[in-house]
Image (spheres, rainbow, N blue to C red):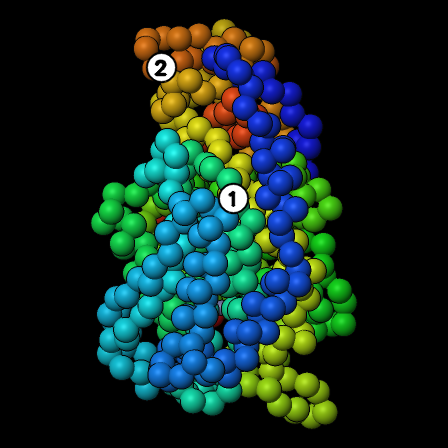
């Protein structure tokens, strides 16, 4: 869906010299995305044999230790291009596990690359894949588990996004993550979310990429035109995760029009979970990107032939052009959000009593930012209308607080929202007023299970 490919930029309060447009910034980043490098990442990671959390760490050619040292070196190779601003580190933690056949606690090691924001560094956007793998025996730390699609593909997207974005400067902070131990309870992403919370970070978006390379369905069809985007919501069709999911469709429509984002309005697939969950549980906007059709015969396998059919999660079944398109959507979304001012705070919305106009009261954390308004029918999946600040007759109620009037928009029948607009034309996530009678957005409808 591409509801608003063309936008007019009628931002409020913008003055002075024009910085490079967001279109130019994103286009420059997208030119860096290279399917061949994604392929090399996936083949190298699969070549370590297994990246099981209990696999060996004392080898340079096999096991999870070799994998994470190689990943750290790849992120570190981006440091010169970033002008020395990219910080690369291993994050270590001892996490409770308790899965059958596994120790009660597991030492986890995430590999993190952080591009600190230039003016709003506490606002953080995270993209991550999990670099650990497993085969059909959950506690097998020695047998083959190439994990090419699950999830060398998502790890490759995070690494390639780092390579594409590290040359530029963004007001907000970007974190590129290779998570450990997703397969045994989302342990790496839990540790990362906990550390970010302890550091006082404001995570405004987390994109988990997990299985983003298989474009061939089990029915023989090719499904390479879209990626699925799963998002939790406390109630109704809005909430931080849904807001981020719609930011993905917006960025894809604006910057990657040949590829689509399929919104799926549930937190994850049935009975399964992923690395976006700990971030969503923390109250932060988080989504999961996954290929359109999974091939279950190739997940959590070594390489073998069964009943004449090839099984196994090996690189030959990964479509690197498809993974590159997923990378482009992620890069466009991260660049857009990290360039934009922080999202507005919506104080209230009400329908006027004398006519069918909606009044929306809001604050902009960045006083110099512009803004615009969007709305959609309650049953529509994505925003269908945009109203410029000039048209909405924005007025200042008191310093920092503003009121806008959306003419002929009947609030009781639609969802309205506000987003901040940067001087470069970048757009923040959309902020919406609380739904009538809604609980605070906090999902509790899916099991905590890695896959
Ligand atoms: Zn996975």
- SS under mark 1: loop
Within the image, what quadrant is residue 383 found in? top right
Residue at x 41%, y 47% (from the top left corner): 84
On screen, residue 163 versus residue 325, left or right, reads: left
On screen, residue 99 versus residue 253, left or right, reads: left
Return the mark for residue 401. 2
Q: Position of residue 445 (x, y in %)?
A: 40, 57
- SS under mark 2: strand
Within the image, what quadrant is residue 140 found in? bottom left
**Assess mark 2: CB under 8 A from ligand 1?**
no
Q: Nearer the viewer, residue 162 or 152?
A: 162
Residue at x 41%, y 70% (from the top left corner): 68
Rendered view: 262 above or below 363: below
Is there any visible trace of residue 437 in the rendered image? no
Q: Position of residue 325 (x, y in %)?
A: 66, 53
Q: Which of 426 and 343 is in front in this view?
A: 426
Q: Position of residue 392 (x, y in %)?
A: 54, 12
On screen, residue 331 versus residue 324, left or right, reads: left
Return the mark for residue 167. 1
Label 1 crowding class (10 Å Cα cut-off): few <14, some 14-19, many 20+? Answer: many
First of labels 1, 2 by sequence position: 1
Residue at x 54%, y 80% (from the top left corner): 47
On screen, residue 30 versus residue 96, left or right, reads: right
Return the mark for residue 35. none
Question: Contact, CB < 8 Å: mark 1 with mark 2?
Answer: no
**Assess mark 1: CB under 8 A from ligand 1?**
no
Q: Which of 316 and 58 is in front in this view?
A: 58
């Amino acid at each position: 869906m591409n509801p608003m490919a063309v936008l007019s930029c009628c931002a409020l309060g913008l003055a002075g010299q024009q910085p490079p447009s967001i279109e130019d910034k994103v286009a420059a980043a997208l030119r860096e995305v290279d399917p061949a490098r994604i392929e090399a990442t996936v083949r190298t990671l699969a070549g370590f044999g297994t990246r099981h959390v209990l696999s060996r760490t004392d080898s340079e050619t096999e096991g999870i230790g070799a994998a994470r040292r190689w990943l750290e070196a790849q992120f570190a190779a981006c440091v010169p291009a970033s002008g020395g601003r990219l910080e690369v580190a291993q994050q270590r933690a001892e996490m409770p596990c308790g899965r059958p056949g596994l120790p009660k606690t597991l030492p986890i090691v995430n590999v993190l690359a952080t591009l600190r924001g230039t003016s709003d560094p506490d606002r953080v956007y995270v993209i991550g894949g999990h670099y650990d793998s497993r085969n059909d025996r959950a506690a097998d730390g020695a047998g083959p588990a190439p994990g090419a699609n699950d999830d060398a593909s998502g790890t490759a997207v995070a690494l390639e996004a780092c390579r594409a974005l590290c040359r530029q400067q963004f007001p907000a902070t970007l974190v590129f993550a290779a998570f450990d131990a997703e397969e045994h309870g989302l342990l790496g992403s839990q540790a990362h979310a906990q550390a970010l919370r302890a550091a006082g970070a404001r995570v405004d978006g987390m994109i988990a990429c997990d299985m983003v390379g298989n474009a061939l369905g089990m029915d023989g069809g090719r499904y390479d035109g879209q990626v699925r985007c799963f998002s939790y919501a406390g109630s109704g069709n809005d909430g931080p995760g849904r807001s981020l999911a719609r930011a993905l469709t917006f960025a894809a429509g604006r910057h990657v029009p040949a590829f689509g984002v399929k919104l799926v309005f549930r937190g994850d697939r049935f009975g399964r979970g992923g690395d976006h969950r700990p971030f969503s549980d923390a109250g932060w906007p988080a989504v999961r990107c996954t290929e359109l059709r999974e091939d279950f015969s190739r997940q959590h396998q070594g390489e073998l032939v069964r009943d004449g059919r090839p099984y196994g999660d090996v690189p030959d079944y990964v479509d690197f052009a498809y993974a590159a398109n997923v990378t482009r959507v992620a890069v466009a979304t991260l660049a857009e959000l990290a360039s934009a001012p922080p999202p507005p705070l919506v104080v209230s919305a009400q329908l006027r009593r004398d006519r069918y106009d909606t009044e929306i009261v809001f604050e902009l954390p960045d006083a110099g930012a512009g803004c615009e308004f969007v709305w959609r029918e309650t049953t529509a999946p994505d925003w269908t209308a945009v109203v410029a600040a000039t048209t909405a007759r924005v007025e200042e109620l008191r310093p920092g607080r503003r009121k806008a009037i959306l003419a002929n928009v009947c609030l009781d029948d639609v969802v309205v929202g506000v987003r901040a607009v940067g001087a470069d034309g970048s757009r923040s996530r959309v902020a919406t007023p609380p739904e009538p009678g809604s609980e605070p957005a906090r999902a509790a409808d899916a099991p905590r299970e890695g896959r």
